[in-house]
Amino acid sequence: MLTAAGALLYADGHRNMAGSEQKSAELGGIPFRNRAGADANLAQIRQRVPAELAEVIPALLADLPDPDAALNHFERLTEGANRELIRLLAKNHTLVHYALAVFGYSNYLAETLLRNTDILQTLIREANLDRSHEHEEYREAFGRFRSRSFETDIALLLARFKRREYVRIMLRDVLGFAKLAETAAEISALSDVLIEEALRECTTELHRKYGQPQHRDLEGRLVETPFAVLALGKLGGNELNYSSDIDLFYVYGDGEADDAAPITNREYFVRLGQQVTNVLSRVTAEGFVFRIDLRLRPQGREGETAISLGSATNYYSEVAQDWERQAMIKARPAAGDVKLARQFIRRLQEHIYTEDVNFPAIETALEALDKMRNKRVTVPTGSIDVKLDRGGIRDIEFLVQCLQRVYGGKQRWLRSGGTLFSLQKLHDKRHISGSDFHHLTTGYEFLRCIEHRLQLRNGQQTHRIPMEERELQVLARSLSRAGEDPLSPQKMLENLRERMAAVATIYDRIIHQQHRSRDQELPQTFELQTAEIEFGRVPSDQQVLRQLGVDSPALYRIASNPELEAHTRRNLFKFLSSAFTSAERYRAVADAPDAVERALELFRTSEFLTDILIRHPEDVASLNDLRTSSTRHQNEVLFATDDLIRGGHSEGLEDYLASDALTWSEGMALLRRRFRYRMFLSGARDVIEARPVFASLADTTAAAEEAIAAAWAMVGRPKGMAILGLGRLGTGEFDCLSDADLLFVRDKRVSAKRATSVAEEVVQALSAYTNEGSVIAVDMRLRPHGREGEMTATVEKMREYFAKEASAWESLTYTKLRWIAGDERLGRKAEGAAIEICDRFAGDPAFAEEVRQMRAKLENAEPSLKTVPGGSYDIDFLSAYLVIKHGVHTASGTISDRLKAAGRAGLLESHDLQDLLDAMELFRTVDHAIRLVTARAAKTIPVSEGAHRSVTELVSRMLSRPLQGSLEETMKASWSRVRGIYDSTLQ
């Protein structure tokens, strides 16, 4: 950096340099490499400029990094200068200072200034080096620049404008008016404008050729299909270098063009992306605007230049590798449709920020980093790369991103692009210590300053410290602070190595601690300070006990109880270890010892509930919401508090999700936490209070209905559509780990495309996996024509299908059709259409035989508790057959409710009815208990001793009666009775 002379010149309002005559006009004290050449250059300059101007030059050269280059370029300036320029320089010595600063720091920008000397007049006229320019100012400046130019090549115009503006930016940088972050932000703001202008030009050209890209919205109107350019990497973080590549990502809106369009929307936007890339990267007489890197798009080099919103969302939710998700952490809108860009970013964030998979996220990204380093070309021994070497820029950026990913899921405030800003936030939240924050921040600023100086030198993308003594000395002098003696090369290298070593130490401790021994002592403090506290490691059981002994005597008493069964103890310590992944989780657990004690029964009995608590240990506090009433069957909500997650009012949740108060990813997270809360508390009540299974299934069905209605609200509650349930959702017997069989119905006035888009969004809201998990797996195969059919159906098409094509087994399925969400009138019409298929088969003499054949096929398939002769499928088929055959259209509710309706209609003997009801309760109870105990929808009774015992005990408690013999014997007896009734009814 120049000495205070530069700042004084500017602050004094462009007056002639005071006291410069007092400095020696001789060049003896200036570190020239070629003294003879310097003398010759100064002699030439003296012949061309007034004496008072020539006298100030030596004083200004003294502090420059490369006085030889500065004097040589200034000589060239005066050689080609007209009288007006010479008078301007003589009158404003400040401009001499500016010119020499450009010439002494950058050969690259020296050429720009020599070809565009009017820049000096602009600098003196605008007199604004003391403040940074923002986006709008650059946009207006380009408009003025273009209006004065006769050039028609947009690529050349953009490249020229960029280099001219770089002169001003670098002067603010080297003269000390701007700090590192300001400089990087100005370069980034300028870059955004250049991208915008390239996009505007290319869009205009394609509009002339193909017209405006359009699609039909949900109301059937033709609307413009949006396109956005996202900035990633350094540009995304607003921390661009002077010679960075820029990482771009092109995305366009969903929806197909009309058949009359000359090309598809996909073809249009791919061409648009290609043209924008060409404009920005094509070499002109002024060089290129940018080197463009599109390799971070889906499928990398093999992927299409532009990708639709839906395809991009699907890629990052299901296909992308973890390093690809991390690469999107700095994504932000750069040009085009900001709303579209933000919508994509909101969807991305749920796959980027996750504390639940912190170890794999770090390990996967580490592997990517190592692969990148291993591909480096051979370099001279002893050379230093300030970006890629250990302790370099990449390590700091990578470390910050990892911490953001781990903690940014719940602490949204941590989600910011810039590295320095993110470091400050991580420190504010105590995820890094004060000492680490100081070393990382100062180290990053020093390394980035070196990077800037290296790239300013010749306009090349380089990060390597030069080996030549001459270039090393220029670099060292360029880093010197105002008012201080210039750095020597040796001192600079010593400083650099010390800073990189400090960064490497911090990096190893925070990132690689996951890979080291897990048996180090936990510190005796509760606050999360990554440098000193070992939150994030997996502690040993003894470490957990010692920490609990310090922080929570109540939890220590629970965990140290010698009477705990081995299985319960293992699950308890898995849970406690998970709580140590962050201070927030640990605090939530430490504050709820009573809930932890209640959870012991869950740890003993249920892997399903234990898994939830291990993934989300803070959820243990919700056990305090369980009321201890002995009432066996409670239909009221289970929640005592009023917040949206633990509240009992579905309408409030739906309205909130339908509002603009939340982003898409925030809504997804809220929906998942709410559903998890309801399912967890329902299962916990089953284990702790052992209520009847149909009370439990009523709760879980209500939770699923609420989730579907909430997802419907998230997509805007579109008119003319309804969601109906089939299967166990349709009968109100939805269980944990069940799939939701859904049917989407649309009014015939709603287009299939629009309805399909809505259905896909609802399915994504329910089934997409995020860091909060998913809600429900959705199955749509029961729709007309199954997988081959349209995703949505009209009532008219349903009737047509039911009348002509539907099979007998489908009539059984559609007895369970039930409206869940959306247009209730439309839903009831669909339910009415389902009655028509029942009426069609009711009079078919072959109906009973077709039912038996279908049941036999399932029986002969892979055996399970459901398909075994006499299993729950016998009762399911039997109840549906009776309802259809005898027109009991009022039958609804659970299969047991349907059996009772058949009994009231005189279709079953009372003793047969009771046997079927008892069997159905047993079958549902066993199935539910297996799901809770094993965390799987198993096909058989578990054989392991512990799981078998837990299932048997839970079944007996939920039935409120002891089993007659073993569980297997009880089931076989029921199967035999059920099969006898089934055979006699369908003979």
Image (cartoon, helix red, strand yellow):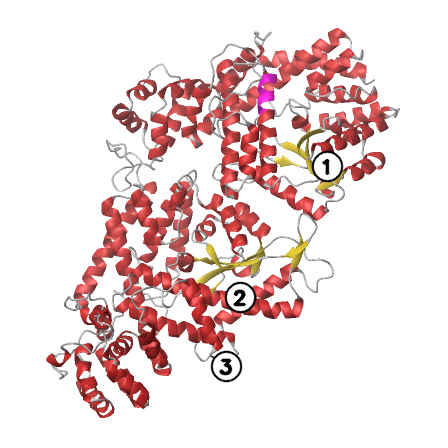
Please indicate, yes or no, whether residue 115 appears anywhere in the rendered image: yes
* Mark 3 surroundings: few (<14), some (14-19) or many (≥20) residues within 10 A: few
Q: Nearer the viewer, mark 2 or mark 1?
A: 2
Q: Mark 2 points at which residue?
A: 199
Quarter-of-image position of residue 537: top left
* Picture layout, residue 144 above or below residue 216: below
Secondary structure beneath disc 2?
helix
* Picture layout, residue 564 above or below residue 712: above
Residue 698 highlighted magenta (yes or no): yes
The alpha-carbon separation of the residues under discs 3 and 2 comes to 20 Å
x 17%, y 84%: residue: 55
Residue 553 highlighted magenta (yes or no): no
Q: Nearer the viewer, mark 3 or mark 1?
A: 3
The overriding secondary structure of the stretch rendered in magenta is helix
From the image, which quarter does the C terminus lie in?
top right
Q: In this view, does 305 lie to the left or right of 234?
A: right
Query: In front: 414, or 148?
Result: 148
Please indicate, yes or no, whether residue 290 appears anywhere in the rendered image: no
Q: In this view, does 78 lie to the left or right of 210?
A: left
The alpha-carbon separation of the residues under discs 2 and 1 comes to 44 Å
* Mark 2 surroundings: few (<14), some (14-19) or many (≥20) residues within 10 A: many
The alpha-carbon separation of the residues under discs 3 and 1 comes to 63 Å
Highlighted range, magenta: 694-700
Q: Mark 1 points at which residue?
A: 783
Q: What residue type is labelled 2?
A: Leu
x 39%, y 52%: residue: 417
* Picture layout, residue 959 above or below residue 620: above
Circle number at residue 42: none
Secondary structure beneath disc 3?
loop
Q: Name the residue under label 3.
A: 150
* Picture layout, residue 889 above or below residue 633: below
